[in-house]
Structure formats: structure tokens, C-alpha cells
Image (cartoon, coloured by chain):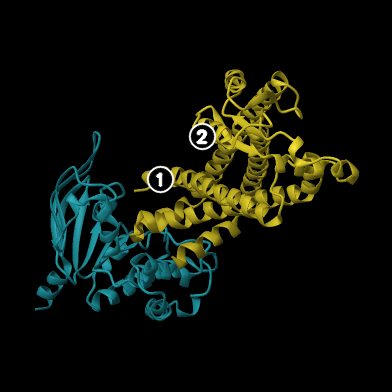
Chain colours: A yellow, B cyan
Amino acid sequence: MKRPIKTGFTYVRRAPYQAISVVLVMAVTFFVATMIGLLVYGSTKLLVYFETRPQIIAFLKTDATDAQIGALEDTYKNDSRVRELKLVSKDDAFALYKNATASNPLLGELVSPSIFPASLELSVTDLSYADTLVSDLKVKDGVDSVGFTASVGGQDQLSSVINRLKSITKSVRIAGIGAVVVLLVTSFLVLLVVMSMRISMRKNEIESLRMLGATGAFIRNPILIEASIYAIFGVLIGWFSASLTIMYSSPRLLSYFGAIEVLPHTLNELLILLGIILGVELIIGLVIALFGAVAAVSRSLRMIQ
Amino acid sequence: MLEFKSVTKRFGDIIALEGVSFEIPDGEFVLVIGPSGAGKTSILRLVMHEFAPTEGEIFLDEIAIHNLKRSQVPNLRQQVGAVFQDFKLLTGHTISENISLALAVKGVPASEWDERVFHVGELVGIGDRLNLFPSQLSGGELQRASIARALVTNPKIIFADEPTGNLDWETAEGIMKLLSKINEEGKTVIVTTHNRDIIKEHKGRVLEVKKGKLVSDTNTKKKHNEKAD
């Protein structure tokens, strides 16, 4: 394997301008691919954030018994329309109140947990189930009143926000995948053309090797390694540029989106995400390079018996 | 031993070789002569399995060349040391690297290359030119390098196609002497040529090809010896 690697690097050195052009085209492709990968990650997180927030809150009567509360929990835990269910006890509600009024401790001193109603917070798997769930909950024993999460408005507003996010996420994914596919095809074609040029420049060399008894693999391997070098450098440059850009802008992005984790909050998690993207890109880059090189070299080997 | 049995090669309507049969035992020096287009190079190309015969059989020892699968062709070519009129040396590599390439193709360990390259370099008389590039050598030296590349893997047979075609008489004579020397060391050597001076000087077997047919198979060495007796 030493000889093909050495020969592959020699081939790259012999025509540096062609090598630079292929690497740059691949770098642009993988810069965009990395950015779109992060955009898809961020938009998915945004959507999940809104979808998984408690959308329905059932306030329980102050005299609701533990048995009633337990029965309600059992019923909705196993309901396929419910994504998540959380019981907020009187004490939890009191703690939440105290947190909210931490700047004015006197407000917290004046109340006791007993005046706060316990509640069940539910998020639905699909917003279309919300209406029927609200109606069901309203007639259950121990339930006082039922409503939608106040922070994002009523059902119509929540539905509209999520639908708009879904539509944006879908558009981002389609446009992103479309752009990446076009760039990948362009990279493949540029690589194919350059490799074909390189092979036709080496026609005499291949012919001589054939006459000496070189096998297809002996001739092909250095060319595949040359293509792999282009792919690896292209991916690394594109990914590194995109990673630097995202690391530079992440503090501003994170502070803008607040609690929504459009990017991982810790450096370790961000590096893991970027590492996964790099791994996937290396695989895609190598597949493109190897396909391009094999297509170019097979044609030429068929012509030179 | 190389054996052609009623070999015919057609390219559409054009007949390159027709019913050619001959046997070349191990250790023989054979000239294949004839005018341009007679079919001399087709014999080499058939031996190298650049194409298969339309009819007939070709054997190199136990290898049935006419029946060879594509995957077996590299192995066959590694056993034939081919020398070409246009040398077919790689211009971007030194002479030493060009010769080593044949060893790399055959899978000889890299640790043996230097010694073997130096040995054949000395044998063909270009020991002091091994680190030069082909563009820095004369025609005769290039042909010697090409012969060294053919020899370095110790093939069963050396097949030289018009090795003196691009050379002046003096250089050509030197190349023929070198090939004779290689033959004296026990290698089978087959040389195609249309050079009358070389044919006149040659003492040994001569196969004459005209319009794709083998028209004569003579041995001038035998005649020479008979006359001497």
C-alpha cells in the first residue's frame, strides 16, 4: 500500500493547479453542506422545542384526592395522543410561584402551598388532538378547568406558530438538500473531468504499465488515492471554515434564541456535533471521489488493453 | 518454448496473419523479418495478448495464450520482457525508477530493487546513467534502458520489436550485440526487424513474414556451420 500512496501524492504534486481547483470546488460544497447541516439541526431543535412544550394544562380541584389524580395520570400516560405528561403538585406550583416572585420575597411570604392548585401538563403528539383532549379533560373527576399554555397564546396562535415552523423547517431542509445535491453533482463532475484529463495525460504511462504486466489495481490504486486526497482536503477545508464561522457566531446565536438550543450550549457538545458532520462529510466526499475516479479510470483502462 | 499453431488474425477484411505456425525452443535467438505491414508486430501483440487470434493456438510453455482470460493477461506479460522501438520509458521518472517499475509490477520486494537495477544497468552498459531522466539520454542509451527494464524481472523470453528502428547503424549494432550477449546467457530472444544490415550480420534462425504469411524459416547458423564443415 506504500507505493500507491507515494505515487498518489506524486500525481497531486505534478499538477498543483488542477489539484487546487478540485479541492476548492469540494471545499465550497462542504462549507455549504456543513452550514446547512447546522441549520437543519437548529431548525429541528426549534420545532421540537415548541412541539414538546406543555400545550394543555388541566388545573385540578383543590379537594382532588390522590386516587383521582392517580387515575387521571394512568389514563393519559397510555393515551397515544399524549407525548408527555407531567404532574405539578401544590408544592411544585408554590415553588414555581416563589421563583417567579423571587425579586419580591414578601409576595411569597403571604401565601401557602394550599392555595395553589395542582395541575397536569400535557403536550400532544399532534395539535389536531388538542380540542378533543381538552373536552375529555373538562369532564373528568377532579378537574377544575382546562386551558392552553399561556406563554404562546391560545390554541390558534400555538397551532399557527408550530405550523409556520414546520413549514419553514421543511423549506430549509428541501432547499438545503437541493443546494447540497447540486453542489455535490458539480463537485463530482469537476472531479470526473479533472481525473479524466489527468489520466489522458498519463495515457503513455498507463500503456507502458499495461505492457509490463501491471494489473488493473496496480494502475487504479494511485489514481483512487489521488482522488481521495482531493476529497479529504476539500472536506477538511470546507468543514473547518464552516466550523470557525459557527464558533465565532455561536455566542450571539445562543443569546438570541435563549432557552432554545439551536446549537449545543457546551463546547464539547458542539465539537461532537461538528465531529459527526465531519464524519458524514468525509464518507460522502470519499464516495464521490472514488466514484469519479473509478468512472474515469475504468473508461481509460478499457481503451488500453 | 513459444509455439504458434496455424495462427490467423483478421481485423475485419484485413488479414494481419494467416496460418502462421512455428516453434521457438528455449534459448534460441530468432529474427522475425519482413517489410513494414507484413505482420511482425502482430506476432508480438499476439504473444502479449493485446488481442486474441481469430483462429489457431499460441502457447508459451504451459500457458495457452489464445485462451487467456483478461485477469490472466498481467501474469503472462510479466513473463515476457518486451522491448519497443519507441522505448516506452516514463519521461517523469529516472532510468532507475523506470527499471524498478517492472519490479514493482511483478511484486518484487522494494529492498531488492537497488541491487537488481544496478546489476542490469551494468549488464547493458548504462550503470552510470541510472539517475538520469530519459530526456538526458541518447537513443542507444534509451534502448539499453528499455532492454534493462525488460531483463530485470528475469523473464522467460525477450521480445524486441524493431529495437534498432530509431538508431544509427553503429548504435544498432551495439544493441544487437547486447541482445546476443543476453541470448548467450540462456535467454530466448526474438527480434523483429526490417534492417538489411542486421539480417545480413545475423547468424541464427530467421523467420520471414510477408503479407501475413510465414514464407521462410531458415537457420543461417546451421548453413554457416555446414559450409565450415
Q: Earlier in the sequence, mark 2 or mark 1?
A: 2
Front residue of B23/A154: it is A154
Front residue of B96/A298: it is A298
A93 with respect to B93 (left or right): right
Measured in 3D between alpha carbons, the distance from the residue under mark 2 to the one under mark 1, in whole angstroms, is 65 Å
Q: Categorize mark 2 by other alpha carbons within 10 Å: few (<14), some (14-19), many (20+).
A: few
- Find residue A74 and name its label: 2
Which residue type does callout 2 highlight? Asp
The quadrant of the picture occupied by the N terminus of chain B is bottom left
Q: Is residue A261 visible?
A: no
- What is the total number of numbered labels drawn onto the structure image? 2
On screen, A293 above or below A184?
A: below
Q: Nearer the viewer, mark 2 or mark 1?
A: 2
Q: Give SS at disc 2.
A: helix
Q: Give SS at disc 1.
A: helix
x, y percentage for residue A138? 62, 20
Q: Quadrant of residue A154?
A: top right
Front residue of B76/B14: it is B76
**Residue that carries the numbered disc 1 in the rendered image:** A298
Which residue type does callout 1 highlight? Ser
